[in-house]
Image (cartoon, grey):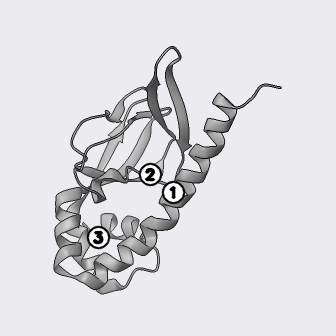
Amino acid sequence: MRGLERIIQDHPFFAGLDEAFCQLVYGCAKNVRFAEGDYLFREGEAASRLYLLRQGRVALETKTPGRGTLIFRTLDTGDLVGLSWLVPPYRWAYDARALDPVRAIAMDAACLRQKCEEDHDLGYDVMKRVMPILIEHLHGTQIQLLDVYGDPA
């Protein structure tokens, strides 16, 4: 487990997290791999994991009427995949598909939520780390929507 602990501590999302908090979240984690084309999750499924990308790229996709599948965001090594685990009803609002072979740390969402609920200082620290990522995703999606639906003139 020591290797997994080091990987979690070194990931940008958990980097600098208090050692006591790190100790709390280690038990929620496991290594996972996805082949190119595999789905990490699909829209409507239970948001049961948070993924810390260690290697590879992941496309966030949504189905659009008349246009098919639209990639609205591409995530890369060091990024977080999946924020719906944090907000009820804990369901994915889009698909996440591996564009390359992907190595990641999968954090069990129920475990992580429970740890945050039991230790509000940890929960606050996690929220401070998630909010900038969420805002970045919103801005990126806004730009993508302007590209897709903007005036071609």
Rendered position, 97 above or below 27: above
Q: Position of residue 65 (x, y in %)?
A: 46, 18
Q: Which residue is mark 3?
A: 2
Q: Is residue 12 visible to us here?
A: no
Q: Mark 2 falls on what kind of element?
A: strand
Q: Quadrant of the N terminus?
A: bottom left
Rendered position, 113 above or below 67: below
Task: Tell me, yes or no, whether the two marked residues, 2 and 1, touch with CB atoms within 8 Å.
Answer: yes
Alpha-carbon distance for marks 1 and 3? Answer: 20 Å
Q: Amino acid at mark 2?
A: Leu
Q: Nearer the viewer, mark 1 or mark 3?
A: 1
Position of 32 with respect to 17 (left or right) is: left
Q: Position of residue 107 (x, y in %)?
A: 27, 57
Q: Amino acid at mark 3?
A: Arg
Q: Which residue is mark 1?
A: 78
Rendered position, 25 above or below 51: below
Q: Amino acid at mark 1?
A: Gly
Q: Residue furthest top?
A: 66
Alpha-carbon distance for marks 2 and 3? Answer: 18 Å
Q: Which callout, 2 or 3, points at the residue further toward the start of the chain?
A: 3
Rendered position, 56 above or below 134: above
Position of 111 with respect to 58 (left or right) is: left
Identify the residue at horizontal 43%, vertical 40% (top origin).
102
Q: Position of residue 118 (x, y in %)?
A: 16, 79
Position of 38 with respect to 58 (left or right) is: left
Mark 2 neighbour class, 10 Å CA radius: few under 14, some 14 to 19, many 20 or more: many
40, 45: nearer the viewer = 45
Q: Which residue is mark 2?
A: 53
Q: Position of residue 109 (x, y in %)?
A: 23, 57
Q: Is residue 66 visible to us here?
A: yes
Q: Quadrant of the C terminus?
A: top right
Identify the residue at horizontal 55%, vertical 41% (top origin).
74
